[in-house]
Amino acid sequence: MDLEMKPVCGLGACQPRVLRKFASIRWFTAFYSVTGLLTTSLSMYMISQITTIERQFGLSSTKSGYLMACNDIGYSAFILISSYVANRVHIPRYLAASTILYGISGIICSIPHFIYKPDPLTNVISNQTSMSRKMAPPNICLNTSFLQMPTTTPSANVDTTDMFASVADDADSTRSAVAMAFIATGMVIQGIGKAPRYPMVGQYVDDNTRPRETGFYMGIITTLSVFGPAIAYGLGALFSRTYVTLEDVELHPRDPRWIGAWWLGFLVFGVAAVICAFPLALFPAQLTSLRPPPSRTPKKDRPCFTVLCSNIFGIFKTLFRTLSYPVFTIMLIASILIVMAYGASMSFGPKYLEVEFNVPAWQSNIIIAAFGIIAVCIGIFSGGVLTKKLKLSPFRCSMLMFLPQVPTLALQMITMFIKCDQPRINNWEEQQSSMLPSSCNSDCACSNAFLPVCDGNGTNYFSPCHAGCTGGSFYKFTNCSCVPGGEVSTGLCEFQGCSSMWLFLAINFLATVLGASLMMPTFIFTIRIVPNDLKSMAIGLSALATSLFGWLPGPVIGGKLVDAACILWSGGAATLGSCSYYNLETLRYNMYGMAIACKSGAIVLLAVIVCFTWNMHKWPNKADEENEVDFVYESYIKQKPGALLDTNGLDMKEKL
């Protein structure tokens, strides 16, 4: 082939000679791996900032669960369309467009910060300190309702008239609604951008490499994308330690008024994705002539409506054929249950650590990155090795799915009872303590504004006023008549003498490894338990069903379970706002109760599958042992039902 006939990079007539060396699958893999890393990071970043977003805009966990579910709404709406047009479009440009959508979604999610940008903390301190001099004369307890931060953390519990409280509630409700609208829009767009990635990348790589090389390049892309969640949680931890206005403040992350710079990650990932998307658009539609486009036999002209109806009928016919296999249908329901439980726990995993073990947001993100991501990688790798080394029959594959679930369920039951004691808050009517003198704050007219403070001995108080403080600043309060040392600092005390978190993490790490190990056996079972011509539909149906009925409702259910454990809300009568204080025992039982229930149902269904496959020694329509079909390659990467590979990885149709 002459040089002029070789594929070159560029747009239209603009094809500089310097770009010709980039027209190879190696350079495409390199460029797309960067964009894949960015988009995966952006997808997981939202989870790392849930607590901060709830605090700034007064959102309940149910509402934040709805926001996370919006991602799967966009994905579910476009995944089948993306798969259908994958071999009919200019794939690099579509991938560039989807990456730009990712970037736009991140920028949109950051907009609420700029609409309701908090005032610099130095100004807030200056104004409220001068107010404290007027409102707190000597020997009168310090009523700290004015120390709340209405521009960042709405609180309608201040002592005002009903009219002003109503106005405050309306303002807070409007702010929450606007923030949710922007973030929800961004998450839907993110889901739309996510839909074309895997079907189009697999198609493009496979069409421009030799069969035996496809797995190598796809392995590079997949491996690098695994680091996306680690980057998301790592930068999430960094931004959570940075104050929302980017000031260098003395307020510490344990303070209930602390708000991290959540918007910064959306902006960084969004802008980076938009910039890195443009090189993808320069790649040609086809890099090599190894696999020329298949010749299509001419068809008789038919009306568009007739063709559309025929295609729709064919899709539904194939769908019902796939569901007519009872073992596949049972496997699909079991997968939905597992994904639903995982979606709920993953969405609120960082928040669970924050609440149950009283760790700041930045620390919980680091823990999730260090333990959770590594555990998932080990589990997926182990499952892949087992499926490669073992010669799986239907029965062996079903046992490989069933056996890890039993110890996983047992470990989750144990984890549910690993706890730290509920932090006691003294001088609060919900948790009165007889150890304090009843007269220590009898002269105080304290509001209901929750600003927990801690003395140096591990004792919590509802607010500086409830601790009998008559002086202090924005960060520390002094002359506290209820406190032996007479001084308190903001935030709940660190849990003393409780090292349960490390036991919790160790057991949860093992459970995650076992749970992730069934991903590859489940995939193998899904595509092999149906005939060859239904493999693509089995994959698409499995992805769509788990997204619609597992990933989408999982965060919403998880949010409702988290809210059900709330004792004290930050909002007023018109809106609950965000939760300020949880019942730890209820939270544990709610979160793990759902996971155990879903896991138990899945185990029962997997046991039924084991019974169904007890005497199955061959897969449906399995090829002869001499020319065994590579189902994984054909259905997951190539997605071309009917094309066979021999044991040397060569296309048998090409040989014929």
Image: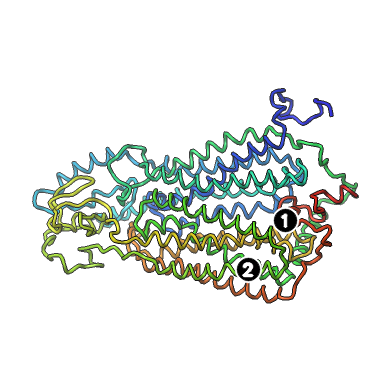
Which residue occupies the extreme top position in the image? 17
Q: Is residue 262 above or below residue 641?
A: above
Which residue is label 1 attached to?
Answer: 632
Q: Let me know if residue 10 appears in the view.
A: no
SS class, disc 2: helix
SS class, disc 1: helix
Dot 1 amino acid type = Val
Residue situated in front as seen by the camera: 320 or 391: 391
Which residue is label 2 attached to?
Answer: 333
Dot 2 amino acid type = Ile
Which residue occupies the extreme left position in the image? 139
Give percent across and percent down for residue 224: 59, 44
**Label 1: how many residues lie within 10 Å, few (<14), some (14-19) or many (20+)?**
some
Q: In the image, 646: left or right of 372?
A: right
Residue at (35%, 66%) from the top-left corner? 583
Give percent across and percent down for residue 493: 27, 56
Residue situated in front as seen by the camera: 526 or 163: 526
Residue at (51%, 63%) from the top-left corner? 511
Q: Is residue 174 above or below residue 244?
A: below
Residue at (38%, 56%) from the top-left corner? 354
Labelled pair 2, 1 in contact (Cβ < 8 Å)? no
Reading the chain from its start, which is encountered first: label 2 or label 1?
A: 2
Q: Let me know if residue 45 appears in the view.
A: yes
- Please give the count of numbered marks on the rendered protein: 2
Give percent across and percent down for residue 430: 26, 67
